[in-house]
DNA sequence: ACCCGTGCTGAACATCTGTTTAGTCTATTG
DNA sequence: CAATAGACTAAACAGATGTTCAGCACGGGT
């Protein structure tokens, strides 16, 4: 009996990749040894380099695998863009995450690593999401459901990073509010408050009392 | 001539700590070797363990040093809380960061690492900032400059993580909007848009068209 | 003058790392 | 059946890493 249960009839190569993905997401590729990955996958260390050439090859394979998962999410978003514009409300990246990835998936944590380390793959992903956010916001402004704002470039970035912050700071948030915000219950509660702030605002200024500066 | 210039008459121990702080912030403690730190500080590898006992000891010393820097920021915020409540506007953590730490300081990147890894020190820091945010928000609501919101716990977390996201995603944001948001110019442009969203909202709903679900 | 503690170093050590090598097992093909 | 190919492994190897050790320089106290 290997240490991996429930992997079904996956090929050993896939089992190794999955184990690496999970370990990389949790602790980062540099802090994980080939021997650890091999043990987690229930194989010998030599087999992982047999299948992936080297640890860097495995890292690349995991990057590509995760990238495809994120891109499929991205494509789904693209497809529903028109619906989102005319539809009822703002569908956040975090909501899509919570909806698309089953509980316990290592992908949110992997995305966190990707964005916070200065990884070019993470920068590219952020760039694509930013472009999408800008387009979506423009469309919504045309229809009249979004205020354009004085500085659309910054506004789009603001809305996007607010979204990503939920994924990046998932654990501290969970500790603070008492519920994991990437679970169905958590994301519902979170989205409700986000919608309130984005439609009604959070602060009040007496008319004409703009910041002078 | 050592490789370190402008360190003045700092003690060697302090020079080592500063070099370690910078390297840890950039690449993470695990990816930095004792020999690299020693070279950057212009001393021998043996001296760093002579002063700090071990690499882990150095890590702890750097953690404590950075923690004190963050806490001083925190205290400053606490002192100005009353002023902030009655004052003109929301002073974000990011604004305080941009204001308090000179350009090129490794501390923002260090905070990023602290929050990224599931470090208890990072969790504690987040917890303190969260408590402060809640208190601040309550006070502002009493005075009437902030809407309380239906779910104050979530709303405070939302506002806080939006703030931290600016620090965490500094580099991708800079690439997207073309200006580093932690520079004086960047933070001004950013804060203006944040204030607009927080006071006027970003989206419009026709009255009575609340999300049904 | 002597000693002693402190800052500091070069060299060595033990361990852990990614990787290689030689070889076993198993299934498929001729 | 023999042979070939690919999945897989145990053991070893070279390099890097954290750490230790023995000793040097040097300043202050007796």
Image (spheres, coloured by chain):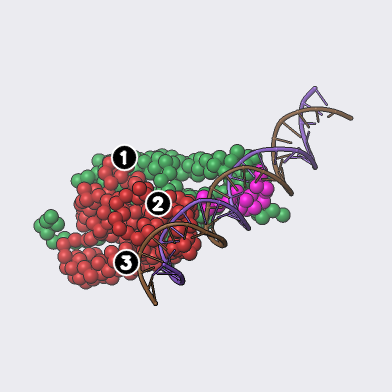
Chain colours: A red, B green, C brown, D purple
Q: Specify whether B16 is left or right of A36.
A: right
Magenta: main secondary structure = helix
* Residue sitting at x 32%, y 59%: A10
Residue B22 visible, this angle:
no
Disc sitting over residue A42 in the figure:
2
Position of residue A70 relative to residue B157, above or below, is below
* Sequence-first tag of 2 and 3: 2
Give the foreground label among 2 and 3.
2
User: Image quadrant of residue A66?
Assistant: bottom left
Lateral position of residue D17 relative to residue A139, left or right: right
Q: Are marks 2 and 3 on the same chain?
A: yes
Residue B42 falls within the magenta-colored stretch: yes
The image's mark for residue B145 is: none
Distance (Cα) linking label 1 and label 3: 40 Å
Alpha carbon distance from label 2 to label 3: 30 Å
Span shown in magenta: B30-47
Determine whether label 1 and label 3 are within 8 Å by CB.
no
Residue B176 percent coordinates (x, y): 39, 66
Q: Could you tell me which secondary element the residue under label 2 belongs to?
A: loop
Indicate the quadrant containing the C terminus of chain A: top left, top right, bottom left or bottom right. bottom left
Report x, y in % for residue B130: 34, 43
Residue at 31% over, 40% down? B135
Q: Residue beneath label 1, please? A: B135
How far is the residue under mark 1 from the one under mark 2? 50 Å
| Residue beneath disc 3 | A71
């Amino acid at each position: 009996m290997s240490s991996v249960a429930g992997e079904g009839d996956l090929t050993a190569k896939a089992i190794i990749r999955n184990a690496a993905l999970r370990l990389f997401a949790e602790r980062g590729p540099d802090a994980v040894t080939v021997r650890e990955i091999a043990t987690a996958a229930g194989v010998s260390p030599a087999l992982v380099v047999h299948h992936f050439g080297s640890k860097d090859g495995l890292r690349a394979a995991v990057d590509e695998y995760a990238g495809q998962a994120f891109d499929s999410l991205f494509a789904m978003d693209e497809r529903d863009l028109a619906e989102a514009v005319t539809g009822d409300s703002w569908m956040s990246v975090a909501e899509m995450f919570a909806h698309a990835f089953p509980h316990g998936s290592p992908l949110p944590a992997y995305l966190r690593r990707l964005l916070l380390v200065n990884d070019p793959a993470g920068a590219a992903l952020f760039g694509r999401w930013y472009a999408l956010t800008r387009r979506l916001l423009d469309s919504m402004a045309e229809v009249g459901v979004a205020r354009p704002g004085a500085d659309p470039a910054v506004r789009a970035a603001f809305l996007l990073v607010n979204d990503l912050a939920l994924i990046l700071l998932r654990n501290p948030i969970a500790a603070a509010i008492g519920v994991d915000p990437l679970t169905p219950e958590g994301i519902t509660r979170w989205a409700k408050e986000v919608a309130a702030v984005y439609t009604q605002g959070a602060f009040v200024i007496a008319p004409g009392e703009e910041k002078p500066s």
